[in-house]
Amino acid sequence: VVSADIQQKLLYQLDALLQQSGCKVHAIQAWGWLIRLLGFYTIKHRRLLNQLLKVPEKTFSDNDPQVQIASQ
């Protein structure tokens, strides 16, 4: 079980990584690890899933092809 505080902190940190120059690929990798760790929990908690899906949504249309590849 993931507390709401931890969820918000993780989402904030992922968003902060996306804002840093050169860290977008790392943010996407961390997002993937987080999704794997949370697994079925995210399916039961749709609000969390919707918040997590905003991370790759921000990177799909990035100008850097490496970021686009990492997003897929």
Image (cartoon, rainbow, N blue to C red):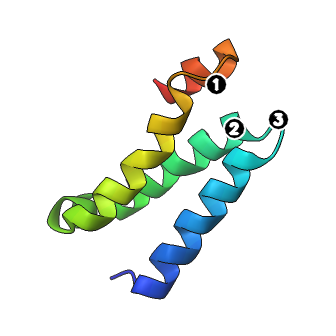
Above or below: residue 9 compared with residue 15: below
Above or below: residue 61 compared with residue 51: above
- The image shows residue 8 at horizontal and vertical percentages of 50, 75
The residue labelled by disc 2 is 24
**CB of mark 3 within 8 Å of CB of mark 2?**
yes
Secondary structure found at label 1: helix
The residue labelled by disc 3 is 22
Dot 1: within a 10 Å radius of its alpha carbon, few (fewer than 14), some, or many (20 or more) residues? Answer: many
- In the image, what residue type sits under mark 3? Gly
The residue at the point 65 percent across, 13 percent down is 65
- Out of 6 and 16, give the one closest to the viewer: 16
To which quarter of the image does residue 9 belong?
bottom right
Dot 2: within a 10 Å radius of its alpha carbon, few (fewer than 14), some, or many (20 or more) residues? Answer: many
Dot 3: within a 10 Å radius of its alpha carbon, few (fewer than 14), some, or many (20 or more) residues? Answer: few
Tag of residue 67 = 1
- The image shows residue 29 at horizontal and vertical percentages of 59, 41
Secondary structure found at label 3: loop
Cα–Cα gap, marks 1 and 2:
6 Å
**CB of mark 1 within 8 Å of CB of mark 2?**
yes
- In the image, what residue type sits under mark 2? Lys
Above or below: residue 71 compared with residue 13: above
Q: Quick one: label 1 or label 3, which is nearer the N terminus? A: 3
Residue lying at the far top in this picture: please name it: 65
- In the image, what residue type sits under mark 1? Val
The residue at the point 60 percent across, 67 percent down is 12
- The image shows residue 20 at horizontal and vertical percentages of 80, 47
Q: Quick one: label 1 or label 2, which is nearer the N terminus? A: 2
Above or below: residue 17 compared with residue 25: below
